[in-house]
Amino acid sequence: RLGARSCASGTAPACGSVEGQALRWRFAAGGAVATCAAGALLYRPQLARTEGGAGAGADAVPNFTMASTKYDQSTFKGRLMGMYEYIDPRTLLLTSAAVQASQKALESFKATGKKPDGMSDADMWTHRKNVEVSIHPVTGEELLRVGRMSAFVPMNVPLCACMLMASTTPQVLLAQFMNQTYNVVNNYVNRSGATVDWSALLQSYGLAVTASCSIALGAGQLIQAVPSLQVLGPFVPYLAVISAGSANVSFTRMEEWNGKGVSVVDGEGKDLGMSAKAGQQGVLQTVLSRSCFLPIAPMVMPVIAMKVLKPFLKVRPVAIVAELLLITVCISGMLPVALSILPQTMEMDVKSLEPAFQNLKDSKGNPVTKVFANKGL
């Protein structure tokens, strides 16, 4: 743990003292704020604009359309570029009035088929991004800011730092509690369906907190009791996070895979009804990409890197800031990769769904063999 590594410097006050621990956490808190701000600068997309006018680089973007996405979602590179825009933390600065202005610009385009006067293709793509990152695609409601995917990096940097630096039992419990509290908010905000079963949501919250705290404490005690297992130390927070995260996603979205299901459409965009089996696929894909793959970088790689850098980081504040920077870089780099592995829109063979979807025809009388649904994040 970072606390143990930082103690190697031998600087006063002693790390085991109350003053030493308080000083370490004050440095961590300040460093977390600084690295969150630095993380925002890692993103290349320009700050979302809400005013009309030709933007710089307008010639470099494709012609605006509502029929397809800005980047080709059938390729990993296209999904990755789109995800970098989607999780840009600077879009959190958008006001409700700015989002409404973007919605009006898109409505005007839909009604006339033309861009509003004075707006370029770049402006229209910006308006579309503003709406897509701020408005739920099913309910049409504005998303809670703290739960948006654009808030994922700023929120997770201090959370990961707390989990990695927690050394006492109260610190471990508090860190896991805060992490799962944020997870349940994020899962709710980014659900693929319109409704949620609140009893299931509270159950998932309780289960996730219990699982993460139990695994973190139990594994930590096991490692202390069996010295040969100390090499697994960096994986304790990771194991707790993926176990609780998987349970959190599954229970938060229980209505999708064990209830009403998710909305399914055909190739023409026609709503074909709700499918629980489609919901099962969406939840499973989310668990694999976000709960299992994503935490590897911020929870494991910084710990390994800090062991390598230990001889060069003998000053405690420098070590803390260095680990926070590593966490920020890992989350910023891994989040879009994890979310881009699988397409946001699932394409499914009707044979894998309920019998109600087996013998449908499109508007031209052709059999519907493929259907589509929102995977959720």
Image (cartoon, rainbow, N blue to C red):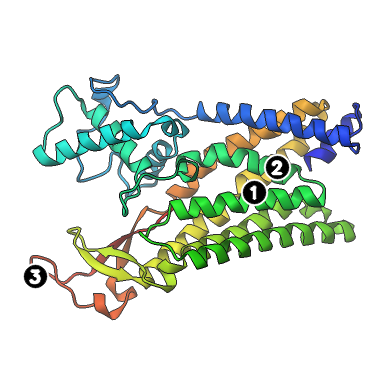
Q: Which residue is mark 2?
A: 162
Is residue 317 depicted above or below 352 in this figure?
above
Q: Position of residue 150 (x, y in %)?
A: 46, 39
Q: Earlier in the sequence, mark 2 or mark 3?
A: 2
Q: Which residue is mark 1?
A: 178
Instruction: State the image coordinates of residue 11 (x, y, percent, origin top left).
Output: 90, 26
Sequence order check, earlier mark of 2 and 1 = 2
Q: Which mark is residue 365?
A: 3
Q: Quadrant of residue 356?
A: bottom left
Disc 2 is placed on an element classified as helix
Are the two marked residues, 2 and 3, in contact with CB atoms closer than 8 angstroms? no
Binning the other alpha carbons within 10 Å of mark 3 as few (below 14), some (14 to 19) or many (20 upward) gives: few
Amino acid at pointer 2? Cys
Q: Which of pointers 3 and 1 indicates the residue nearer the eye?
A: 1
The answer to whether residue 285 is above or below residue 107 is below
Q: Examine the rendering and report whether any part of residue 324 can be seen.
A: yes
